[in-house]
Every structure is written in structure tokens, then in C-alpha cells.
Amino acid sequence: MTVQEGLVIATAVDAPQPPRPRRARFSLGSWLLPVYTALALIFLLIPIAYTFVFSFNNSLKSNISWRGFTLDNWTNVCNAQDVCAAFGNSILIGVVATVVATALGTAIAIALVRYRFRFRSAISLLLFLPMATPEVVLGAGLASEFLGAGVQKGIGTIIIAHIMFCISFVVVTVKARVSSLDPALEEAGRDLYGSPAQVFWRITFPLLLPGIIAAALLSFALSFDDFIITSFNSGPTTTFPKFVYISAARGIPAEANVIASAVFLLAIVLVISQQVTAASRRKRLSRVG
């Protein structure tokens, strides 16, 4: 054997061999999470799908069994007795409670973050209590207070009750936004001879606005959806959740399903619009950068 042949054989032996194809192995972990996620989504979407489908049901006195497809429920949504009045009451209560709770909660959040005063920690603790206390306890306690004070229950008592528990959620949401603000921005405004009102409305408030809007949306959702506290303090006034609960025994009217489906679709449209707007804004900023 020549030297050249030996070098060729040694090179061929030392050359890395191509990797052998591995057999696909079954892994329980790789399948468990997707299956669990799919089942959770199906479980959450079944009631929504049922509500949407039965909003087209040609029901008579009950809306439990399918009787045929119709669009009359969507074109004549107020045919069911009291459904539109209950929905209007929920909208009114939600808007008023949201406006008041957002204004008060924003002021409290700014005070807790920016200022030092006595009983500051105690106030922060007390603001968390409505979030941790069961709604049955809150509703019963408020009902007892209204009864002891001789206050007639109605829309006014519902609004007061909703403001009470919505303030806590507003404070927590806005407080996180206030804590993340850079004080140097406000100091720059004061260095440019801006008055306290100008600094607040032109610098602080625009920076707080995303947190305030998030708190207001959360507050309205909680107010519109509440049943337990409303039931204790509503008296003869009927809200949409209370109407649905009372009607559930004989089958929720299809018109109520129409309103619920419309609210759900509106929420989906708002979320998609916000995501599209945010994506377009990020794209414009990336192009500028």
C-alpha cells in the first residue's frame, strides 16, 4: 500500500458520518398542553355559541328547545316584555357608576402614589377590602344600611353600590400606571413655566389616559355584569342580569340572547380594532426609527 492510499483510507475513516434519522417518539407533554387548551376553549365557548344560536330561535313562550330559524328576534328585539328597559337600566347604571368611580379612583390613586400623609397604608388596605370581600357580604351590608337609613331602593341605590366596589378596581389599575410615570417629564413642564393645571392636563393626564381608559372599561364591565350586589339593593328596578336570572327558569327569551350576542360581538369588534390600530402604530414607529 502506498502512502497516498493510506492517507485516503485514514481520511475516509475520520470523516464525520451523516446522522442517522431518529424515529419519532410519542411525547405526552407535547400533546397534553394543546389538548388541554383546546378543551378549555371549547368549554368556554359553548355557552356563547348556545346564546348566539338560540338568538335566532323561533321561540314562543320558552326558548329551551329549537323550533326553527328566524330573524324576527334581531329585527324586533324589544318585543319581549321589559328586556329593553332592563338593558337600558344596566347601561345607565354602568355609565354613571363608571364615570364617578373613575374620577374618584384616579384622584385617590394619584394621592396614594405622589403624596405622603397619615393613614396612607391603612387607606390602601381598606381599598382592597371590597375586592377581597364576598359580594354576598357587601350586598347584604349595603342593603341593611339603606334599610336602616330609610332609603328607598332603586336605581340610585344600585349606582351607589356599584360605585363602592368599582372604585377599588379603578384605584388598583390607575395606581400601577401612576407608579410607572417618570417624574422628570413633569419637572420639565414646570421648568418651562407651566402652571400646575397645564402640567397636569398636557403632560400627566395624557400619560395616565391609557390606564384610566382601562380602568373605566373594567369598571363598566363589572357594573354591567353584576347580579348579587344589584339583587340586594335594586328593589323593584330590573337590570339586564337580573332580568336574565328571573327568566332563566322558563327559558331566557330569544331577545335577551340577541342583546347578549350583540354585546359580545361589539366587544370582539372593539378588541380587533384596538389590535389593528396598535399594530399599525408600531409599524409606523418602526419605519420612522
Image (cartoon, rainbow, N blue to C red):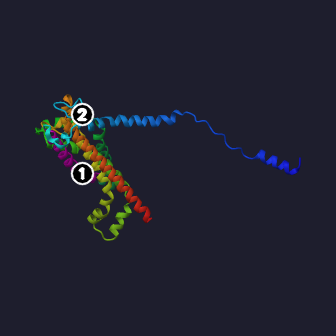
Query: Of 281 and 144, which appears nearest the observer?
Result: 281
Q: Secondary structure at mark 1?
A: helix
Q: Which mark is residue 104?
A: 1
Q: CA distance from mark 2 to mark 1?
A: 24 Å
- Give the quadrant of residue 70: top left
Whether residue 90 appears in magenta in the rendering, the answer is: yes
Q: At which x and y percent is residue 156?
A: 14, 44
Q: Please indicate whether residue 209 sits to the left or right of residue 1 in the image.
A: left
Whether residue 85 appears in magenta in the rendering, the answer is: yes
Mark 1, Cα crowd under 10 Å, few <14 / some 14-19 / many 20+, is: some
Name the main secondary structure of what is drawn in magenta. helix
- Give the quadrant of residue 160: top left
Query: Of 140 and 261, which appears nearest the observer?
Result: 261
Mark 2, Cα crowd under 10 Å, few <14 / some 14-19 / many 20+, is: few
Question: Magenta segment, which residues?
Answer: 82-109
User: Which is more N-terminal, label 1 or label 2?
Assistant: 1
Query: Of 202 and 29, which appears nearest the observer?
Result: 29
Count of numbered circles in the view: 2
Give the residue at mark 2: 136
Q: Residue furthest bottom?
A: 193
Q: At which x and y percent is residue 167?
A: 26, 46
Amino acid carrying label 2: it is: Val
> At 44% from the left edge and 35% from the top edge, which residue is drawn?
35
Q: Which mark is residue 55?
A: none
Q: Please indicate whether residue 30 sits to the left or right of residue 278 in the image.
A: right
Q: At which x and y percent is residue 144?
A: 17, 35
**Disc 2 vs disc 1: Cβ atoms closer than 8 Å?**
no
